[in-house]
Image: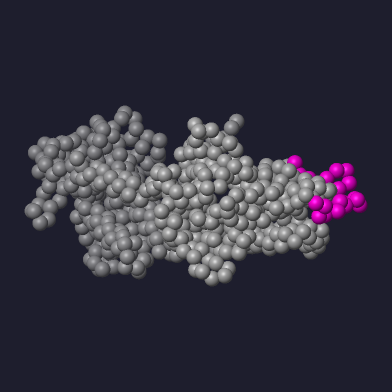
Amino acid sequence: MKARTRVAVCLALTLFSLTFSCAKPQQPSLIPSDYSRWKTTTDVVLDYPIPGHEDRFRVIHINDKGLGFTRDGRSPERITFPEGTIIAKDIFAVKNPGPSDLPVMITAMVKSGTNPQARGGWLWVVKDLKMGKESIMTGDFCVRCHDNANEKHPYGWKNPGGAFTDYVFFIPGSDPAVEASPN
Amino acid sequence: MARAATRRPLGLAGRINLVVVSTLFIGLGLVGYLYATSLSSARESLVDSNLLRESDILYLSIENFMLPGDAPVAARFFDEVAGLSAGYSLRLYRRNGTMAFSDNMTIDAVNTNIRKVRFERRNEPFAGSAGGAPAVDSSDRLQFGKATTIPPESVFFSWNDTGRTYKRFYRPLLNLPKCAGCHGSDHTIRGVIDIRADISNEVRSEAVTIAVSASGFALMALALAAIIGRILRAVVVGPVIAIGRLCLDVSGGDFSGRVDVKSNDEIGGLASTVNDMVHGLRERYELTKYVSAGTITSLGSGQEPRRVERTLLFTDVRGFTAYTERKGAEAILAVLNGLLEKQAEIIAAHGGDIDKFVGDEVVSVFSGNDAPARACDAALDIRKAVAANSVAYDSLAVGMGIATGHVVQGMVGSHRRADFTVLGDAVNVASRLCSRAKAGQILVCDCTRDGLKTGTHSMAGPYKIALKGKAEPQIVYLLQGKTNETDNRKPHHEG
């Protein structure tokens, strides 16, 4: 092999290896596959319409780390979920799914205060189960709605004291005896 | 008839200027393009961020007006903000594209949701609702749709209308949980805030800035091209052109020039080398004056002696010894050189080769089939020239002898100094004939006469004369002229 050819081959190999070494590695999924085995944040049947999810049936799961949230005991109270908390919400296609119906989408809140894509200290994640595509919502659509959880609201325990709930509507263990319709 | 177009090739200077100008224009053009795009992007970003900030303020205002149920205040607020400046408009649309506050639809829905008449229906006509509720322009429906689908997104877009540029911002208004109490929870998007701004002044200002910058870049490119062109011309192109001219002069036989380059770089080195080369060529050229053409030819074609047929022309100034004694050696040199120069010129013009000058004698050699004819013509011309310039040559005249025959041509001399010359009987005969010829006479041997075409030259003779070194008398002729010329010179007869 001539010297010039050797140099060309070396250059091509270097470029090739540089290209692939610089390629963006595939991000691991933010929503673990076993999320459905986690505890639920509420026993309330979430079949009533709400803005954002409208009249689709929902089930909300939280990982064990999230159950370690803290309350500061002041008034109004401040609730803080630890870093690594994942709250995943199954979204079904219909209002009253049967036993064989599977969710079509998962929306999740991942506590990641240092992540530049985080809004309000959370990553707002949507996973389309049909396409298998997971994306982070960087707009204000999710966070703006969940911001209402930090004041009195019409859902679940209704946050009567206007606690700061870290953008979470259903604080585990705060369910009222009966879920009231928001209307 | 179509004339064939001939394209003149671009010279070195032109090509270098073309490269410089192209490079500068491409380089500065790219810089200008990047500048223009970054300026445009910065302007767009600034406008967008301003509109976004305005929309944030409006969003919060709407929230704060609506929550206590002050929708009429919100409507008035919108009208007043919209009237702040010309070209600026502010509207609030429902999610179906109809304008908010344009009818009683929302009032009815809210009263139904809260199960009491919290808001009285309005009976007076709503502003701008004549002919039906005003709605989003059909041309903007696509952008409006992006702001009302889930997930909704804020949409910026711009358009031109009657020479003015507008920017529109559709900001989705969410049906937040705190809004759901009055507006219901069955929908996510309440409506869309529509902010329209006339950005013609900003766009015009940007265009002027870009135009001024582009002109500046173009002028800078031209100025730089001129400066770089001048520098390159002085440093590279000028010397190269001068070297080219010098080479052209040298090829034309003029060795007097030199390239005046004082730099110590590669161009200076090249110029110095060319100057040295021309100097060497000049020396060699000068040397050729002292060396016969045959000698020079032999250097290229080999120096082995060879036997060839040649015509020899000998000329000699008559009465020169006495003339020298009379005038003095120094005084006659100019006259002699003039005479020899003229003869050499004529011989060269007829294709002869000066073999040597021996005092006032010229020995020349002619080769080729027509060598006798050219030697005779040269001799006739010499005689004519000398006679015509007798005053300049101080009335000196020459006698000439021409002989043709086989000679040996080769190098004669030592390794240090040698001449490429001819030896043989024809040389001796020509020399003897020259010695015998009187002033103005041209004696020709019979071989030379036989070598002429019949009737081309007029001859007197034949004569038989005794030549030194020859046992038998030789047949000779007196060359009188060409047949178409008149030679009044009387032949000299010798028996």
Which residue is rendered at x = 16% and y = 48% of the image?
B420
Screen quadrant of the N terminus of chain B: top right
Which residue is rendered at x = 43% and y = 59% of the image?
A68
Which residue is rendered at x = 21% and y = 45% of the image?
A3
Res. A109 visible in picture? yes
Q: Position of residue A41 (x, y in %)?
A: 50, 51
Which residue is rendered at x = 60% and y = 45% of the image?
A53
Residue B425 sits above or below residue B255 on the image: above
Res. B37 visible in picture? no
Q: Most prominent secondary structure in the magenta stretch?
A: loop
Does the magenta portion include B101? no
Q: Position of residue A31 (x, y in %)?
A: 43, 47
**Who is closer to the viewer here, A150 or B220?**
A150
**Who is closer to the viewer here, B219 or A13?**
A13
Magenta residues (range) = B116-138
Q: Residue extending furthest bottom?
A: A74
Q: Position of residue A130 (x, y in %)?
A: 49, 36
Residue B455 sits above or below residue A55 on the image: above
Q: Residue extending furthest front?
A: A177
Q: Is residue B364 left or right of residue A111?
A: left
Q: Residue extending furthest right?
A: B124
**Who is closer to the viewer here, B327 or B133?**
B133
Quarter location, residue A85: bottom left
Q: Residue extending furthest top?
A: B454
Q: Is residue A144 left or right of residue A70?
A: right
Quarter location, residue B78: bottom right
**Who is closer to the viewer here, B39 or B71?**
B71
